[in-house]
Image (cartoon, helix red, strand yellow):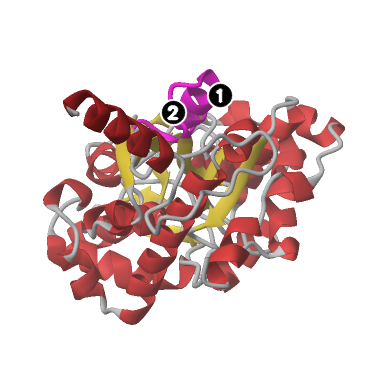
Amino acid sequence: MYGKLLCLGAMLALLSTGCDRGGTAAPTGGNAEPEAATQTVRISVGSYNLNNLPFFIADAQGYFKDEGLEVRTENFAQGGAKVLQALVAGSTDVAVGFYDHTIQMQAKGKAVTAFMLLSRNSGLVLAGGNRSPFDPARPETIRGTRVGITSPGSSSDFFIRYYLERHGIPASAVSLIGVGSGAAAVAALEQGKVDLLVNYDPAATLIQERGVGRILIDARSDAGAREVYGGIYPTSVLYAQQSFIEKHPDAIQKIVRAERRALKFIAENGAEAIVAALPDSYVSGDRAVYAKAVESARGIFSVDGRFTETDMATPLAVLAEFNPDIAAARVDLAKTYTNRFVDRASSGH
């Protein structure tokens, strides 16, 4: 009898594998494999930049756990380019990074797809130290300066290269230096290691609060983005290799549901409440200053996670200006992102 009970238990355990938390079979479509009730997903995050705030909220508020996901965060604060490398190498499953990376990968023949929009606008600023010689009214004054970016190949790198290209200044006219983000980037400007800094909030707000420099070009607003890029520049997204999306659609759907809750939380709460929901590990610098940064950047966050076709063209236009491989490639933007999972979540799935 004891042996029969063990066998029965084993059979029930096997039957439960591949079912979602509601007890219904997980969708398998295509080459998808059945998903376990509790799934482990490796998600890499490029930085503490405020553009990634919706991910921090979803993680801190337990939204992933509510969906039956165990999220293992990897490569934290090592830059978007590092996260992209990890994804392509297979050492992470999903990336929290910038949309333009999907365009880069398609130009290289790799199928990487964004499935959730977190930040609909750049949020980047170009700040100058108090002794910086650069005057935006005279673009040529940027020559000979040391420009801090988060890392080579990052969107902050693209920002400054696009600026230089638009004004007929070769990239070799400046020194591009990777300084990371947040407090570390502000320290590089304050200590004179760089003359200019291209970064996001909370770094932008920290610079102003500490009086270590001034914002010279501001793309946090829609108007600022259009001035810099010629349009809205979608940034932080969740993306994965298409093969992973096809094999694990249930896990992707759960991530999207969790992140939509995070976007709703950000839209419905004040900056102080948002910051109060985060552990210290996700807050760069003083909480009061961080709250000011959240308020300043509120307009960059997506409301529902959907991609807008016209906005997707802006990053492609920017990259094609200075990247000959992308300019020569026939990039099909429709293959760099999908609204499939967001639309499904909107319908209650």
* Residue 82 part of the magenta segment: yes
Q: Which residue is mark 2?
A: 92
Q: Picture coordinates of residue 90 (x, y %)?
A: 50, 21
Circle 1 SS class: helix
Magenta stretch: dominant SS? helix
In the rendered view, tell whether residue 114 sits above or below residue 121. above
Query: Which residue is situated farthest in the front direction here?
Result: 1
The quadrant holding residue 66 is: bottom left
- The answer to whether residue 239 shows anywhere in this view is yes
Q: Residue at x 33, y 72 (%)?
A: 265
Q: Picture coordinates of residue 188 (x, y %)?
A: 27, 37
The quadrant holding residue 331 is: top right
* Residue 293 part of the magenta segment: no
Label 1: how many residues lie within 10 Å, few (<14), some (14-19) or many (20+)? Answer: some
- The answer to whether residue 193 shows anywhere in this view is no
Q: CA distance from mark 2 to mark 1?
A: 8 Å
Q: Nearer the viewer, residue 14 or 233?
A: 14
In the image, what residue type sits under mark 1? Val
Q: Residue at x 56, y 34 (%)?
A: 33
Q: Which residue is mark 1?
A: 88
Q: Residue at x 35, y 30 (%)?
A: 78
In the image, what residue type sits under mark 2? Thr
Q: Is residue 37 left or right of residue 219?
A: left
State the extent of the magenta-drawn residues as a range: 78-93
Q: Nearer the viewer, residue 40 or 193?
A: 40
Q: Picture coordinates of residue 280 (x, y %)?
A: 13, 51
Q: Is residue 220 left or right of residue 269?
A: right
The quadrant holding residue 116 is: bottom right
Q: Quadrant of the N terminus?
A: top left
